[in-house]
Amino acid sequence: MVGSVRGEDWLRQDVNSTPGVRQPEVNARMPPVLALNVGSSTVKFGVFEAARGHLAPVLRGRIESNGAGRRLVSQDAAGGVLSETPWVAGGDDATSDLLRWVEARLAGPVAAVGHRVVHGGPDFSQAVAASEPVLESLEALAPLAPLHQQQGLAGVRALRKACPDLPQVLTFDTAFHGGHEPVADRLGLPRLWEARGLRRYGFHGLSYESVAGQLAMLDPSMAEGRVVAAHLGSGASLCALRNGRSIDTTMGATPLDGLVMGTRCGSLDPGVVLYLQQAGGLDAAGLVDLLYRRSGLLGVSGLSGDMRVLLESDSPAAREAVDLFVYRAAREVAALAGSLEGLDGLVFTAGIGENSPRIRAETCARLAWLGVELDPAANRRGSGRLSPVGAPVTVRMIRTDEERVIARHTSRLLGLDR
Ligand code: ADP
């Protein structure tokens, strides 16, 4: 089902054997599924056992950079830290190295690997088994997601080479937005370009699927209403959810659109791009570098694209970058309330949304006119309902779990969850 999540789906995985996909033999206790999430600033992974319609986390982890280099942090199912080790793997083999590390830690093989792929383009609206024609058609979308598409697919290719018999499944950040009305996705360009696949797609769909599924369990009446979910991480976007379905979102044809992000500019007057090209002398590669890697919080602060660093800094430019992030986030929540024709709920998620009471408070303060209100103590605690009882708009923080969504689609497609 495209673009919709119901609470019961979140817990129960319907077995859906797909014709043409090799189905591994199903044992009483299947080896687990590895879900890989190559993000803009980190690699996250989760290992899940799938059985009788349920997914149970076994191991989680992330590879992140700090001043001293890269390190791999692993956690048990309850979130307790198991290990912290320097991580020196690099290049295309990083994914194979991570698989080997996971299998050594599990003392056994995984049944399949599921990947997050950022762009599914017009042809992929649900999870698909990795194959040569599929990879070629996804690689052709790289100009629409230059920081992410190639990086994610290189890992799939490396694993196909290292472990040709290992089933691999691709899940898409665009898929959850596939049910939009055409008017929400149409660009104001000649129709020729739409026929060639150029339209708004939206991203962070695996995260929004996770949030919508958890919300349906936590607060079914809120989930049935008009909700804006705010995925505020290194990449940032908003999604308008009506009855658990995405009806609009701030990212467009590419993950450059919408909010100001860690290093990406967000929405920009298209005339600015022409100016940068004509007066600034930037070619396509220079524009990619400027707009994806050197803009956003990093470009405006001149200091860092990392929100924690900016919040701790006393530099005026860091403050201005944070102000711009909040201003644009609040403005776009209001725009999506327009798409939803009202607002019943607001959910914060991802690195900044989950962990920064200050950004949540500053964003909500700008939305008071829409009925958005925070209970300061609940916001500081950051759990459960963050708005006072009886407030017109219910505000929540929900921890996104993209890895679980990737594992769910993977085990379902391969029939591993019976
Ligand atoms: P991605 O998955 O896109 O790599 P994340 O969702 O992990 O990114 O979010 C990373 C962002 O979250 C960074 O800007 C980081 O500074 C921010 N972040 C993490 N913890 C905090 C915190 N306690 N306060 C403010 N920002 C935080």
Image (tube, grey):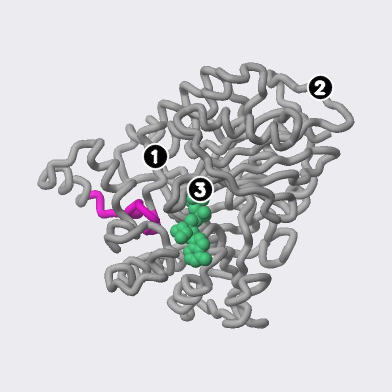
Q: Establish if 385 lies above or below 60.
A: below
Residue in front for this viewpoint, 58 or 246? 58
Secondary structure of the residue carrying numbered label 3: strand
Q: Depth-wise, is mark 3 or mark 2 nearer the camera?
A: 3
Q: CA distance from mark 3 to mark 2?
A: 35 Å
- Residue 259 sits inside the magenta stretch: yes
The quadrant of the rendering that contains the N terminus is top right
Q: Depth-wise, is mark 3 or mark 1 nearer the camera?
A: 3
Residue 85 vs residue 417: left or right?
A: left
Answer yes or no: do the residues labelled 1 and 2 have beta carbons within 8 Å?
Answer: no
Q: Which residues are magenta?
A: 258-270
Residue that appears at 64% across and 55% down: 212
Residue that appears at 46% across and 72% down: 363
Looking at the image, how many numbered discs can be counted on the residues? Answer: 3
Q: Report which residue position mark 1 lands on.
A: 147
Q: CA distance from mark 3 to mark 1?
A: 17 Å
Q: Given the image, on which type of amino acid does mark 2 rest?
A: Glu
Q: Report which residue position mark 3 lands on.
A: 64
